[in-house]
Structures are given as C-alpha cells and as structure tokens.
C-alpha cells in the first residue's frame, strides 16, 4: 500500500492560517490525494481531494507539489472547531471505493 | 438530508457474548463500508457492500465477524463470539459513487464496543 507520513501533532492560534503537510513519496500517477478530518467523538469527515492541480473549496485549500510527492492542506483561518485529527489518504486505484488506507494523522490543536 | 447513522452509540458486553451493530447509510447510497479502530491502532477497512452484495471483505479479521445488508438498505455487523481484542470503535460509511475521484465517503459517528 502506498503510505503517507504526517507530523503527529501541530498547534495553531485561532484566526491564523494552518499548513498541514503530508509526504507521499511512493504515490503513483493515478492516486488521488484525499484529506479527511475527525472531530472529537465523530466519524471522519471529508475535507478535500485533488490529483495534480491545487484545489480550493469552502473548507480548505490543497496545495500539491509539482512532483506530487507531498501536499499541504491549508486552513486559511483556523477556528476552535477545526481542532481535529487530519488524515492524508491516498486513494489507491481500484474499481470500487474500498481502498481508503488511514494513517495515524495529525492532531491539530487550536489555541484561543 | 440525514447523514449516516449508527446504533448503538456504545455497547459493553462480556467476552463470548454476541453483539450486532447497525448502520443506516445516506438514502440512495448504494455503497456501504465498515471500518474499525481498535485501541491504539489506525482506522482499518473491513468490508464494502454495493447494494446487498459484498464487493470486498478482505479486511474482515476472522469468521467471528458477519456483515449483512439485506435489501441493500441498512447493514448489520455481528460479532459472535466477541473477544477482548474486538474492543474499539466501528465506523460505517456510505458513498454515492464507488471508485474514481468522486467517491467521497460519508462516515457515521461510530459505535464504541467494549468487550470485558
């Protein structure tokens, strides 16, 4: 399985931008990069995904390195509600959506 | 629109007993997945239904686990007999599409299972 590596934890101040890095040096050309987050006592929640180009949505932005061996999830203004574990997941090729491989993720703390 | 729901939210049973977990996916989602996180480990895939058919059950740990999805709506995951190492949080997810970039999975809140 293609693996991702993320820092175990990060800290941010409220209202400031947060850059969450993810390394995926063994990514293949067809792997999509997905980000999910897990708020306390909840199931994982979709954040964003991309293939090669940078992506923006209402929750976050995803910056993908040109060689695709790393990516960065950007929260433009962190709020207390953004405190969660963030997972960077490679969507492995396959006919069906079963191949979500979760790593340990990054635990983000947001300080008021 | 209602999200993925799971029942019960918590279950405490003794080793050797049977427990059945239920998942109701988002209406119209043909794809249903079970995952679990056991103590100190990462979230692991268990199996995937497409409608009522098991598409992939490669993550099921052993034959004490039985998943069903009769009629292609809700799903149940039965553990019989439960062992101590089955303790953890069991998540269900559903998606409209399967495969490709559009298969965003929507997760339920999970069922916390404790086996004593």
Image (tube, coloured by chain):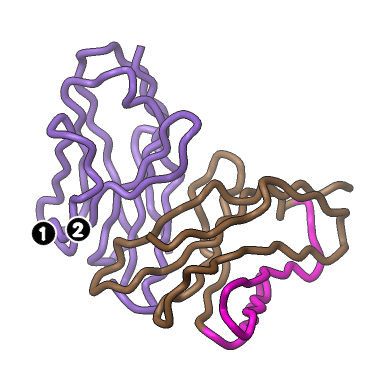
Residue A74 falls within the magenta-colored stretch: yes
Residue at 67% x, 72% y is A60
* Nearer to the camera, B93 or A28: A28
| Residue A42 located left or right of residue B98 | right
Q: Secondary structure at mark 2?
A: strand
The residue segment tinted magenta is A52-80
Q: Is residue A35 above or below residue B5?
A: below
Which mark, by number, is residue B49? Answer: 2
Mark 2 and 1 residues: CB-CB less than 8 Å, in contact?
A: yes
User: Which image quarter: residue A98?
Assistant: bottom left
> Which colour is chain B painted?
purple
Quadrant of the image containing the N terminus of chain A: bottom left
Residue at 72% x, 50% y is A108
User: Which image quarter: residue A68?
Assistant: bottom right
Chain in brown (letter)? A
According to the picture, the residue beneath numbered tag 1 turns out to be: B53
Q: CA distance from mark 2 to mark 1?
A: 5 Å
């Amino acid at each position: 399985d293609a693996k991702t590596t993320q820092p175990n934890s990060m800290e941010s101040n409220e209202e400031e931008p947060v850059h969450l890095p993810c390394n995926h040096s063994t990514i293949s050309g067809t792997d999509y990069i997905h980000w999910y987050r897990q708020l306390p006592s909840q199931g994982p929640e979709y954040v964003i995904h991309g293939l090669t180009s940078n992506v923006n949505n209402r929750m976050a932005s995803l910056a993908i390195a040109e060689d695709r061996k790393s990516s960065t999830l950007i929260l433009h203004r962190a709020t207390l509600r953004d405190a969660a574990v963030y997972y960077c997941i490679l969507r492995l090729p396959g006919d069906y959506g079963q191949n979500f491989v979760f790593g340990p993720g990054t635990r983000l703390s947001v300080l008021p | 629109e209602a999200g993925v729901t799971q029942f019960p939210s918590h279950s405490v049973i003794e080793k050797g007993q049977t427990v059945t977990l239920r998942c109701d996916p988002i209406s119209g989602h043909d794809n249903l997945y079970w995952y679990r996180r056991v103590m100190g480990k990462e979230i692991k895939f268990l199996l995937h239904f497409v409608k009522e058919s098991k598409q992939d059950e490669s993550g099921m740990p052993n034959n004490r686990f039985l998943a069903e999805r009769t009629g292609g709506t809700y799903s149940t995951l039965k553990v019989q007999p439960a062992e101590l190492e089955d303790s953890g949080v069991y998540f269900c997810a559903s998606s409209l599409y399967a495969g490709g970039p559009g298969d965003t999975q929507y997760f339920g809140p999970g069922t916390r299972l404790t086996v004593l």
